[in-house]
């Protein structure tokens, strides 16, 4: 009898134990189910909005100095570029693909100081810089001082995706480009009459400065009527990811392998899904010293201000007080755009998820 009681107790204990285990298993599967549904329901997956902003450089751009036909040419190229990126976003494509598609169109146009329309160095060469940043992963890629890359922004993406590095320069960058099948061109592809004349004017002016002041002013943007024209793009895609890119020929009459802000992550380009994506244009030395693109993101992150407030503070106060000129485009994680500059004008465009298009050139538009 005792034996039977012990056996019953043992069986009862085992039954209880197995129930407990089943409960635990159920809890476990609930947890894992939760984590799956959490992933699906995360804002990054369900965000419906998207948007894109581009710039084609900032500077002394005045209506009185612009012919109607040139103004129309700029506007139509800006529209073509932003629509190419917008189409990609509308169809659910990646922010980074939209950024490169828009920038490629501006790089291939002689209107802008990037790719085909790049400005000349003092020696009459073209040295191009570009960078990209992915706001989701904080991955970045950049190239500086390349002379034969048709679309430097594509090489910057290649550096980000297929090298262990963030920035490559000069000959090494070209060797890497060749190994990755990136399109190369002969250096004279970048020759444009307009930019070459700008160089001649800058050199002439520099001589005058030399004669009178006995000093070399190698980059004075105020004597460079066509120094502006760097291109950039920032985008938010339907998955809630931000991306930024910037491409440039730098500044007319630059020498000593000068490199500006455009390929410097944090100065010319920055993107972070928790804050915003930024692309800069202007007098690069000041943008490097001010770490302008990252500063805007940091203000949003640490002070909790809007993208509009952050860009205004950084451009109108901090950059201006430093003595710098130029502007930025930015877009935040909800698709709010900003186009801020302290120059007379900035070639710029914005398109939202509903397809509303804004294009501006001068300050008061
Ligand atoms: N930021 C560019 C540079 O300094 C020039 C520009 O944006 O116009 O190289």
Image: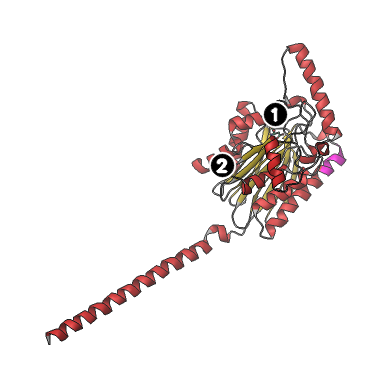
User: Picture coordinates of residue 114 (x, y %)?
Assistant: 75, 39
Magenta segment: 67-73
Ligand 1 positioned in quadrant = top right
Q: Within 10 angstroms of label 2, few (less than 14), some, or many (20 or more) residues?
A: many
In the image shown, does 37 or 318 lie closer to the viewer? 37
In the image shown, does 13 or 349 lie closer to the viewer? 13
Q: Quadrant of the N terminus?
A: bottom left
Number of the label disc, if any, that sits on residue 9: none
Q: Is residue 183 above or below residue 91?
A: above
Q: Is residue 71 magenta?
A: yes
In the image shown, does 151 or 229 lie closer to the viewer? 151
Mark yes or no: residue 279 visible: no
Q: Is residue 217 above or below residue 44?
A: above
User: Picture coordinates of residue 126 (x, y %)?
Assistant: 77, 33
Query: Which residue occupies 59% across, 38% down?
Result: 266
Judged from this view, the residue extending furthest toward the bottom is 1
Q: Is residue 175 magenta?
A: no
Q: Which residue is mark 2?
A: 297
Mark 1: which secondary structure? loop
Image depth: mark 1 or mark 2 in front: 1
In the image shown, does 196 or 340 lie closer to the viewer? 196
User: Picture coordinates of residue 116 (x, y %)?
Assistant: 80, 40
Query: Which picture quadrant has residue 163?
Result: top right
Mark yes or no: residue 23 visible: yes
Q: Which residue is mark 1?
A: 257
Query: Which picture quadrant has residue 262?
Result: top right
Mark 2: which secondary structure? helix
């Amino acid at each position: 009898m005792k034996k039977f009681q012990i056996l019953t107790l043992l069986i009862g204990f085992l039954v209880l134990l197995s129930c407990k285990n089943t409960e635990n298993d159920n809890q476990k599967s609930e947890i894992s189910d939760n984590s799956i549904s959490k992933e699906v329901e995360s804002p990054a997956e369900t965000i419906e909005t998207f948007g894109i902003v581009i710039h084609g450089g900032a500077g002394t751009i005045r209506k009185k100095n612009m012919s109607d036909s040139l103004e129309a040419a700029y506007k139509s190229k800006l529209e073509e570029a932003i629509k190419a990126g917008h189409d990609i976003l509308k169809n659910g494509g990646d922010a980074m693909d939209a950024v490169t598609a828009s920038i490629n169109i501006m790089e291939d146009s002689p209107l802008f100081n990037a790719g085909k329309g790049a400005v000349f160095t003092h020696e009459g060469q073209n040295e191009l810089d570009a960078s990209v940043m992915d706001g989701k992963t904080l991955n970045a890629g950049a190239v500086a001082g390349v002379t034969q890359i048709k679309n430097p922004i594509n090489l910057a993406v290649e550096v980000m995706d297929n090298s262990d590095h963030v920035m490559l320069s000069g000959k090494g960058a070209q060797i890497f480009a060749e190994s990755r099948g990136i399109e190369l061109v002969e250096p004279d592809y970048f020759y444009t009459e307009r930019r070459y004349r700008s160089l001649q004017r800058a050199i002439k002016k520099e001589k005058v400065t030399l004669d009178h002041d006995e000093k070399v002013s190698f980059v004075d943007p105020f004597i460079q009527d066509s120094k502006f024209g760097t291109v950039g793009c920032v985008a938010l895609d339907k998955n809630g990811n931000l991306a930024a890119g910037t491409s440039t020929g730098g500044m007319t009459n630059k020498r000593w392998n000068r490199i500006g802000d455009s390929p410097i992550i944090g100065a010319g380009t920055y993107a972070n899904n928790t804050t915003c994506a930024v692309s800069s244009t202007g007098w690069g030395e000041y943008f490097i010293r001010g770490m302008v693109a990252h500063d805007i993101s940091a203000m949003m992150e640490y002070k909790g201000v809007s993208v509009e407030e952050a860009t205004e503070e950084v451009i109108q106060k901090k950059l201006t007080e430093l003595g710098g000129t130029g502007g930025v485009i930015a877009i935040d994680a909800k698709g709010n755009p900003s186009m801020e500059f302290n120059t007379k004008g900035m070639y710029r465009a914005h398109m939202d998820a509903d397809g509303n298009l804004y294009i501006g050139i001068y300050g008061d538009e």
